[in-house]
Structure formats: C-alpha cells, structure tokens
Amino acid sequence: QVQLVESGGGLVQPGGSLRLSCVASGRVFSIIAMSWYRQAHGKQREFVARFTRGGDTTIADSIKDRFTISRDSTENTMSMYLQMNSLKPEDAAVYYCNAIVGGATDYWGQGTEVTVSS
C-alpha cells in the first residue's frame, strides 16, 4: 500500500505562483513513477507532469514553460513538488498526485484545489 497526501493548493491571483507538495508513504520502495494530474470543473482529468524512479521527467507541453517538477526522498517517504508560476485562470483545478507501483497498480491522493482568480 502507498498513501499519498497533497498540500499547497489555495487561492492565487493571475500571474502568481504556488508550490504543490505530494508526500508518499508506505511501500515507497515499490513506486516506479509519480505524477501530477489536474481536473478542472466539468472537464476530464489531464496529465500535468511525471517523474520516474530512473530520473526521467515529463511535463505537459501546454504548461512546461511555467511549471517545474522536483522530488526528494527519505528512508520512508518520497515527495514530489510542482512549482507553478505565472498562473492563469485556466490552471484552476483540483490537482491530484498519482503513484504507480510495480504491477501497474495506481494510487491517488485526495487532491488539492487551486483557484486562480483576482
């Protein structure tokens, strides 16, 4: 089992920045990739960014000039961060953390909401 907890969402003005965090605990040694997805109201969930245990990083083309992903780990946790700059109203969504473990099992966090509004 892997537990994922996101934090860092909130209300920000257009042009502002936020840093989202996701902390994975449990069987973190089994994680082969961690990703961010987002789902705006009334829309489908979409991919934002991913890193693999091997160090490969992928960021969606639509936001790669404004968002960066980073990570760190301890003996018992694996953390992933999403730095979001120059936020736009269309970035408003619930941001979800996802982890894939060996065997292709998915785990999801509860989500953290980002509101971009003046």
Image (spheres, helix red, strand yellow):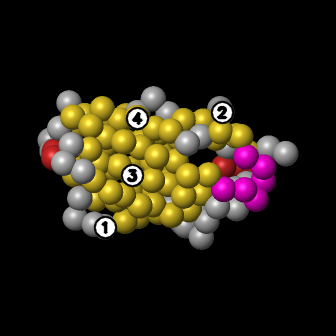
Instruction: Magenta stretch: give its range.
Output: 12-17
Q: Given the image, on which type of amino acid does mark 2 rest?
A: His
Given residues 23 and 40, the one toward you in this image is 23
Q: What percent of the width, then of the height, locates residue 85? A: 64, 61
Mark 2 vs mark 3: give the one in front.
3
Q: What's the distance in space between the residues labelled 2 and 1, CA to CA?
A: 30 Å
Residue beneath label 3, please?
Answer: 80
Pick whichever of labels 3 and 4 is earlier in the sequence.
Answer: 4
Contact check, label 3 and label 1, Cβ < 8 Å? no
Q: What percent of the width, then of the height, locates residue 100? A: 26, 44
Mark 2 vs mark 4: give the one in front.
4
Q: Given the image, on which type of amino acid does mark 1 rest?
A: Asp
Asked if 95 appears above or below 91 in the picture, the reply is above
Residue beneath label 2, please?
Answer: 41
Mark 3 vs mark 1: give the one in front.
3
In the picture, which quadrant includes the C terminus?
Answer: top right
Residue beneath label 4, please?
Answer: 5
Q: Secondary structure at mark 1?
A: loop
Q: Residue at x 41, y 43 (%)?
A: 22
Q: What's the distance in space between the residues labelled 3 and 4, CA to CA?
A: 10 Å
Pick whichever of labels 3 and 1 is earlier in the sequence.
Answer: 1
Residue beneath label 1, please?
Answer: 56
Given residues 38 and 11, the one toward you in this image is 11
Pick whichever of labels 2 and 4 is earlier in the sequence.
Answer: 4
Q: Which mark is residue 48?
A: none
Dot 2 surroundings within 10 Å: few (below 14), some, or many (20 or more)? few
Q: Given the image, on which type of amino acid does mark 4 rest?
A: Val
